[in-house]
Amino acid sequence: MAVHFEANAEPIPGYRMLDRLGSGGFGEVWKCIAPGGIYKAIKIIHGDLRSKDNDLVRYAEQELKSMERVKQVRHPYLLALDRYDIVEGRLLIVMELADCNLWDRFRVYRQKGLIGIPRDELMVYMQEAAEVLDLMNGEHGLLHLDVKPQNIFLQWNHVKVGDFGQVKDLQGLAAQVTGGITPVYAAPETFDGIVTRACDQYSLACVYQELLTGNRPFDGTSMNQLLMQHLAAPPNLNPSPEADRPALRRALAKKSEERFATCMDFVRALRAGVTTPPPTSIVLSAADRPSVAAPLLGSSERSDAVSWDATSVGSSLAMPVDLVSIKTDTPLPAGTPDADPPRLAPPELTGDGSLQPTLLIGIGASGRQVLQRFRADIADHYGNPDAIAAIRTLYLDTDPQAAELGGHDKPWERLAALPAEQIFPTRLNRPTHYMKPRLSGHAITEGWFDTQLLNKLPRTPVTMGYRPFGRLAFFDHFRSLSQKITYDLEAILDPDALTASLEHTGLELRTNRPRVYVVAALAGGTGGMFLDVAYTVRHRLKKMGYAKPDVVGLFFVPPDGPTESVPPLVRANVCAALTELNHYSRPGTIFQAFYDERSGGVRDADAPFTATYILPAPLETVNTPAGTNSSAVATSKMARRTSSDIKALSSSRVMPKPATTTLANDPIATAVARVRYDLFTPVGRMADAARPRSLSALGITVRTFGRSRFSWPRGAIVDRTARVLTGVLLTHWVSPDITRARHLIPAWVSEKMNAAGLSKDAVQTALHKAAAAIFQEPIPTVIAKIVDPVTPKGWMARTPDVNKVIGVLDQLGKAIGHPTGQKLPTALEEALRSAANDVAATGGIMLTTAVHEMIDDPRFRLASAEEAIQQILTYLQVCRAECDAEADRLDRAARAGYDPLMAYVHPQSGAKKPSANDIAEAFRSFPGSQFQAGVARRTAKLFEHLKLTFAELRLQISASRQRIEVVQKLIVTDLEQPSPVVDASYLMPPGCPTIEDAAQRYLQVLTDDDLQEIERLVQIGIEEHFGGLYQASVNSTLKPEMILDLVRARARLHLNSRLGEVDLAGMFKAKWGGKPEAAQAVGDAYRTAKPTLVGNGPWVNHAVTVLGTPAAAAGEHLRQLADHAFPSEDKTLFADTPDEMTVYREYPDVPLAVLPQFGPAWEAAYSSFSEASPHARTDVTQWIGVDAE
C-alpha cells in the first residue's frame, strides 16, 4: 500500500505529521509530533530506493550515505538526528525541530531596516558553526560541503548545523560533486571534483559577508558566471568592514592551502580584526524595504559593494537608476552608485632600477600569445613567473576556446601556459540574452549597439570579426571583469609582493607606481573592447588614488600591402579602431560609458593611453592559417630514467619539423621585448629619458619601433632538452623495471606488510590477543581450567565420570565450538571475526596508503606500484593457501580428538570403549586444535578479503597507468614540434649549428643527480596542483596535456638554473672573428632594427637608439664596434643587458595621420563597408578624423 504524506498521517508509527515546513529539490520537511508529545521534524527525501532508475534514487541514496557518515557525530551545535527509516522505499529522517535558520534571521533584520545581522550577534553564530565544522573535519574526517544560511539553524539563540546530504569523508581527495552543492557558496576546487579540508571554511566566509552586509563575495546570476567567478575572479570584499577583509580574503583564497588551517582560526581572525562594529542601520521607504517572501538578495542583480557609511549603504540598496542611451554629449545618469570611493595612493618610491608593479592585459589571440611568450621569457631568466608577484597577466577573449588556448604550453612556439586565474573568458551569449531588459527595463544594447547585428550571431556565438560584438562582450562581463582588474591591481601593488619580486629577480626598483599594458590586435572583433578596457583600468586606478594612471597600449595592425592581401573587414576594423583612438586622444573629447545599473559607468576627459605603440601584426591575425597535419614519428624507447639512457637517446634522436620563422623577427617576440625592456633592463628607462616632448604640430602621435639582437637561444635549448627529459621521466613512471621488481620492490612489500600488521604471524598474534581479551587470560589457560578436572592423570588413572565429561564438552562447545560446525557462533568466534575485520581495515588502509605514496615516490611511480600490488597479491595467495592447509590439518586433529570423547559419552554396542589414556590424549589434542583451526580459518578469510581489495586496487592503478600512458604518447608529437631556426642573430656553442645539436650536447652533461632534482620539482608541482600523482592519475577530468605541461615546466625550471650564465661577448667574438666582419654584423643589426611601419619623415629627427650589451669589459668590445658601425649622427645610448646584445630603435612621435593604415585602400574599405559599422559603438554620431585640426 502506497504511503501518503499529508497532515495527520503517520508514515512512521507514533510520528504524526502536522504541517509542511518547506520543500526543495531533494525533498520536503514536515513538522510532526513524536511519541511523548515532543515536536520533531521529518525530512522526506525524493526517490524510491527500490527503483532501478539511477536518476530517481540518487538523492535518496546520497542522503542515506551521508546519514551513515554523520550518525556517530555528537555536538550541542549539531542538529540531532533521532532516527531514519525507509518506508515503502522512501527515506524518512527524523531530527530536531529548529526555530528558524540564519536566512530567516537575516530577513527579519532586513525588514527592520538593517543591512544584515548585527556583527556581534553574527560572530556568535559563526563561532558556533565553526566549532561544529572543525569537529566534523578534525575528529571524524568529514566535510559538510553545503554550508549556507539555510542549513545553519537556530534554537533559542544557538546554532544547529544541519542538512548533511552532501557530507563526504576525507579518505580520498577526489569526490564527485553532486547536484545538491550550492554553487553560490561552493569552494573553487569542488568544481573540479576535488574536496579539501578548507572547503567548508570558504563557504562559511561567503555566508558571513552575505549575512553581515547583504552582498555576497561572488554575485554571479548563472551557473557559468558563478563558476568563472569562483575559479578566476577576486571576491568583492568592498561591502565588508575594512578590518574584516584580510581574514575574508585569506578564507576565500583560490588555493585551499592558502586558507586558514581551521574554521575557528578564520573566526578568530575576524574577531581580532574589528573591535567596534560599524553602523548597520539604514532607513528604507516602504517601497524599498524587502519583503520576507522576496528578499532583496534573491534577485539576480545586486550592488557590487556596500560602503560602511550609512548614506552610501542606503543608496546601494535603492532601486537602480534607469539605463539611458549614451550619446557623445550625454552625461552619465545622476545618482549612479559608486562601489568604492577614491582613496589616497601610498607615497611614491623611486630608484635607479627598472622593476615596477605591472599588469599586462592581453586581448584576443595576439594578446594571449604576447602574455604566453612573456611568461616563457620570465621563466627562462627568473624561474617561475608567479614568483614575481608584482607582475601579473590577464587574458581576455571572446573565443569559446579561450581557456583551452591559454592554459597549455607550446614550447616549440615559446608559449607558456597561463594560470587559470589569469584567463578571463568574455564569451558572447545568444541574441535573446541581449534582448532581455535588465532591472531598469532597458536592454544592455540600448543606445549604443545596432541590434540588427545580433541576427548575425551563429549558434555558438563568436564575433566573426565585428568589433561591436567585442564591446558587447565587455559590457556583458563588466561587473566581474572590473572586480578582477581591481583584484589584480591590488595584488601587484601589495608592498610585500613588490619586495618579494625585487628579491627574487635581483633587480632594483624604478617606482612603486603601477603601469598597465593593454595588448591587442586592432583587426579583429574582440579588439573592439580595447578602449573600454583602457578606460576601466584608468577608472580603477584613479579610485585607488593614482590621479595620472600609466596605461600603455601595444597594438598590432596588418602591414600595408596589395588590396587582395588584406580582407576589407580587416582594413575597415583597423581604420575604425585607429579613428576611435584618435577621437578620444583629442583634447576636449570625453569618453563615457554606462556599463551596469549598479556598478555605474566611466567618464574620463583624458586620453586612454600615456603611450601607444603600433606594431606589424602576426600573420594569423590577418588571414586564418591553414591547418597542418602532424606526421607520426617513431621515438626511441626510453625505458629507464638514468643519465646513461639520456646519453644513449642523443644518438637516436627524434628530429623536429623545420620551422619557417625565427624568434628574432617574430612580431609577438618584438612586442614582448618592448615590455621586457621596460621591466627588466635599463633599455626602457633610457628610451623614456631620451624622448623629446610631443610635438603638438604633429597632432595625435604614436610610437613605432624595431629591434635586433645577438643572443644565444637559452630558452629554446632548455625547451628542447626539457621535452626529451619529459619523455624519459614519463617512461619511467609507466614502464616496468626488472631490477626494481627483483630487488627493491620485494623488500618494500615485506617492509610495508609488516608495518601494516598483515604478515601471517602478525595477524594470528592479533587474533590470539582478541581471544584472550574475551576470557581475560590466554586461551590455553582457559582450556586447561576447563579440562583439567576431568583429564586422567598418570598411568593408573581411572576414566572420568561420564556426566562430568559431558559437562566439560558443553563448556568447551560454548567457549571454542565443536568440530561438527553445527553450533551457532560463539563469543570467541565473534571476537575473532571482529578482530580480523579490524586488522583488515587498519592494515588495508595502511597498505593502500603506502601504495599511493609509492606512486608519489620518484623511485617507484605507477609501474612499480602495479608490480608491488602484484607481489602483494601473490603473498596474500600464498598465505591464504597456507592457512587453508593449516586449518584442514587442525580440523582433522580436532576431530580425531573429539571423536573418542563422543564415543566415551555415547558408547556404541560392540565398540571399544576409550581408555583413560585415550581420554587424556583427546583432551590435550581436541580443544587446542579446535581453537587453532578457527584462527587459521579466520586468517584465511582475512587474506581472501584483502586479495579482493587489492585486486580492485590493481585495476585502479592499471587504469591510472594507462591514463599516464596517454600523456606519454603525446611526447612523440611533442618531440616532433619544430625548434626555432638558427639565424645570424643567434650565438651558438661551438660545433652546434642547430638547437637540436645544442640540446643533445646539454643532455650529455646531465647526471643522475639532475634527474633526481627534476623528479623532486615535478613531485612538488604535482602535489601543489593535483594533490599528488595518484590523485592526478585517477582524476578523469584532468586533461593529459596538463600533466605533460607541468612535467615539462619543472624540467625547464631546473635545466634553466643548471645552465648558468654564458660569456656573450666571447661567443660573439668567436663567431665573427676579426673586426671588419664583426663591425659589419653590428651595422647590419642597426639597419635591421629600423622601424618598418612608416617611412622617413620629420619623426626620424627625434629617433631614439639604445644599444644594450653585457656590462663592463665584456661589453666594451661591442660598444667600440657600434661606434664604428652606427651612423655618426645617431646619438646612441648604452645600457647593460647581460644575456644579449640589443639594438633598439624607436620613432617616438609618429602622427596617426601618416600611418599607411589610413591610406586610400584602407579608407575606402572603412567608408564603404556595408555589412555593419566597423566602429565598436553607434552612440558617437561624429568621429573626429585624424586630419582634423
Image (spheres, grey):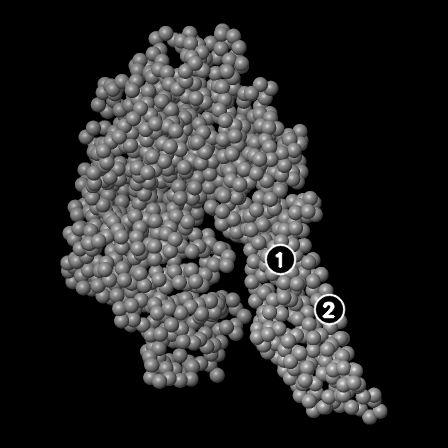
Specify the farthest residue to the right: 910
Using the rendered image of the protein, determine whether residue 255 is visible from the camera's viewpoint: yes
Residue underneath mark 1: 754
Residue type highlighted by circle 1: Asn
Using the rendered image of the protein, determine whether residue 649 is visible from the camera's viewpoint: no
Foreground of the two, 923 or 601: 923
Mark 1, residues whose alpha carbon is within 10 Å: few (<14), some, or many (≥20)? some
Residue underneath mark 2: 886
- The spot of residue 658 in percent (x, y) is 58, 27
- The spot of residue 123 in percent (x, y) is 27, 59
In the rendered structure, are the residues bearing label 1 and label 2 in contact, judged by CB atoms less than 8 Å apart? no
**Left/right of residue 601 with respect to residue 509 in the rendered view:** left
Say what secondary structure mark 2 lies in: helix
Q: Is residue 275 above or below residue 566?
A: below
Q: Is residue 28 above or below residue 117?
A: below
Q: Quadrant of the C terminus?
A: top left
Residue type highlighted by circle 2: Glu
